[in-house]
Image (cartoon, grey):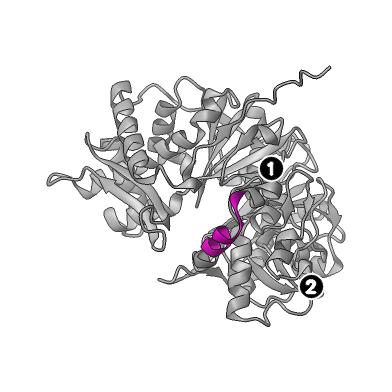
């Protein structure tokens, strides 16, 4: 039996799988509480995270019964880009876990971006801008200069849980990249940005090497009732694990992860063939080339805001209401569109957080129409960012995954926009991370089941094209000059030398 852990931004999940048949034997999940306020704070309590992990493991252990003693390995995947200050020797936290979408360090981010040019960052990170983790470290130092002194580490959620399970510190390449200490071309840590900003180079944890599992610690065996020394693989970024679980869908799949942030994942044989100001480029999980993790500047945070403010948000009724709204009419009325950059700087006034907007609202426009415009705009935004990848034949299918992949309406929108390419959906999107995290132990076990999306009842082609063209016109007018919003760019192969 193997156990997969997937710790996201809002939910912690665990699932146990039969080692021979790959059947899921037991699972458990628990929501993770967030602390938020009007300043942009988005934090979690490390003690509450440990309590949630303890509860979920105990639940799976109870449901597995005697099989628990046959546990052969644990795979760990977690959201990346968050920041926690810990003691290197003991793992004791000295700060809350500051989530990747906490916006309080944006002023520091803009100062860093203005201080050093894009080509400096691109030289080691393949990105045109500083990592948010670096900006957050500077922000923490300015608030409390002593916080980062002594034998402290800046770690992410995956590193922290891996330490709880093994007593060892190591981070995945994607988190290192989001923290500003990853040299992509060399696939190694770099302390260059830390030193340039006056931060201690010892703040970064060691980098994970391949898929080599490490034995669980005796302390973890006692704390979580685990078999002694059970191997632990990871930590993997949640997008790394998710992409690993759908690599079998086609020769060159593009995974659309519809989570808290919407993210596209695809593989390139050569990382130098692609460019984006916002990409995260790490070794592919199967060892073939690189995995491009391209976040969008929108996600479920945007949909949840719209559902809370535009639809019936009554507990127990909200999900049914949003489904009914899109079943009645999938597209917004002609002339209405929405830009979905809710949690990003204003495109015309960057000092203000809030880049979403509606265009074409009139006296007859309803709240439901605004919701339809925003949902369609998010799908059009995904298509805009990845159009060059599709047109350049770097991908040959789209695989919908993440929480909102279960929405029939969003599936229909994606299927309509991605004609004629095949569009699949993960059958059990909630568990793909727990499967992909087991890649080090069994590649077959790591595969998530996918199924073709039904295209029998799609919107009329002309209506889709008109809505998409309107979205692109509005985007170009208001956001087209924002560098971070550029579409992914495929670069031509280098010309062969003519020298003898």
Work out whether residue 48 can be spotted.
no
Look at the image and tell me in which quarter the C terminus lies: top right
312 or 491, which is in the foreground?
Answer: 491
Residue 402 at x, y percent in the picture: 53, 44
Residue 453 at x, y percent in the picture: 47, 28
Does 429 sit left or right of 121 as displayed?
A: left
At mark 1, the secondary structure is helix
Q: Tell me, yes or no, whether the two marked residues, 1 and 2, touch with CB atoms within 8 Å.
A: no
355 or 419, which is in the foreground?
Answer: 355
- Please tell me in which quadrant of the rendered image residue 62 appears: bottom right
Above-or-below relation of 17 to 12: above
Q: Badge 1, how many Cα within 10 Å: few under 14, some, many 20+? A: many
Q: Is residue 482 magenta?
A: no
Residue 482 at x, y percent in the picture: 44, 47
Residue 63 at x, y percent in the picture: 67, 55
- Please tell me in which quadrant of the rendered image residue 435 appears: top right
Q: Badge 2, how many Cα within 10 Å: few under 14, some, many 20+? A: many
Q: Nearer the viewer, mark 1 or mark 2?
A: 2
The numbered mark at residue 228 is none
Q: Is residue 116 magenta?
A: yes
Main secondary structure type of the part rendered in magenta = helix
Q: Residue furthest front?
A: 499
Work out whether residue 184 can be spotted.
yes
CA–CA distance in space, label 1 to label 2:
29 Å
24 or 95, which is in the foreground?
Answer: 95
Above-or-below relation of 192 to 270: below
Segment colored magenta? 109-118
The numbered mark at residue 436 is 1
């Amino acid at each position: 039996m193997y156990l997969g852990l997937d710790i996201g931004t809002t939910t912690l999940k665990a699932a146990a799988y039969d080692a021979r048949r790959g059947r899921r034997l037991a699972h458990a999940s628990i929501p993770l509480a967030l602390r938020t306020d009007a300043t942009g704070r988005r934090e979690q309590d490390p003690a509450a995270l440990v309590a949630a992990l303890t509860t979920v493991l105990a639940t799976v252990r109870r449901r597995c019964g005697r099989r628990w003693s046959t546990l052969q390995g644990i795979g760990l995947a977690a959201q990346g880009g968050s920041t926690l200050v810990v003691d290197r020797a003991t793992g004791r936290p000295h700060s809350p876990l500051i989530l990747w979408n906490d916006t309080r360090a944006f002023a520091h981010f803009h100062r860093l971006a203005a201080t050093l040019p894009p080509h400096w960052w691109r030289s080691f990170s393949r990105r045109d801008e500083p990592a948010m983790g670096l900006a957050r470290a500077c922000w923490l130092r300015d608030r409390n200069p002593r916080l980062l002194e002594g034998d402290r580490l800046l770690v992410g959620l995956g590193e922290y849980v891996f330490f709880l399970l093994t007593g060892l510190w190591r981070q995945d390449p994607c988190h290192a990249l989001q923290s500003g200490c990853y040299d992509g071309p060399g696939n190694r840590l770099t302390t260059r940005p830390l030193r340039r900003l006056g931060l201690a180079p010892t703040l970064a944890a060691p980098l994970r090497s391949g898929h080599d599992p490490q034995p669980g610690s005796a302390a973890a065996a006692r704390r979580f009732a685990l078999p002694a020394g059970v191997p632990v693989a990871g930590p993997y970024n949640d997008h790394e694990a998710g992409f690993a679980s759908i690599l079998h869908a086609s020769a060159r799949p593009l995974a659309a992860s519809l989570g808290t942030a919407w993210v596209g994942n695809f593989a390139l044989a050569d990382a130098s063939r692609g460019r984006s100001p916002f990409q995260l480029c790490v070794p592919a999980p199967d060892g073939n080339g690189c995995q491009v993790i391209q976040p969008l500047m929108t996600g479920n945070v945007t949909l949840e805001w719209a559902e809370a403010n535009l639809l019936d948000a009554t507990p127990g009724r909200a999900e049914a209401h949003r489904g009914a709204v899109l079943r009645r009419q999938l597209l917004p009325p002609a002339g209405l569109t929405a830009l979905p950059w809710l949690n990003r700087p204003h495109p015309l006034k960057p000092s203000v957080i809030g880049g979403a907007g509606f265009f074409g609202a009139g006296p007859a426009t309803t709240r439901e129409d605004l919701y339809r415009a925003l949902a369609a705009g998010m799908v059009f935004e995904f298509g805009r960012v990845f159009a060059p990848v599709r047109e350049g034949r770097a991908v040959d299918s789209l695989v919908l995954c993440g929480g909102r992949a279960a929405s029939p309406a969003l599936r229909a929108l994606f299927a309509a926009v991605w004609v004629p390419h095949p569009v699949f959906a993960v059958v059990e999107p909630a568990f793909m991370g727990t499967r992909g995290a087991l890649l080090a132990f069994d590649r077959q076990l790591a595969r998530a089941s996918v199924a073709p999306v039904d295209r029998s009842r799609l919107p009329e082609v002309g209506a889709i094209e008109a809505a998409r063209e309107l979205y692109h016109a509005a985007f170009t007018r208001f956001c087209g000059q924002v560098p971070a919003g550029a579409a992914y760019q495929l670069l031509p192969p280098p010309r062969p030398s003519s020298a003898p």
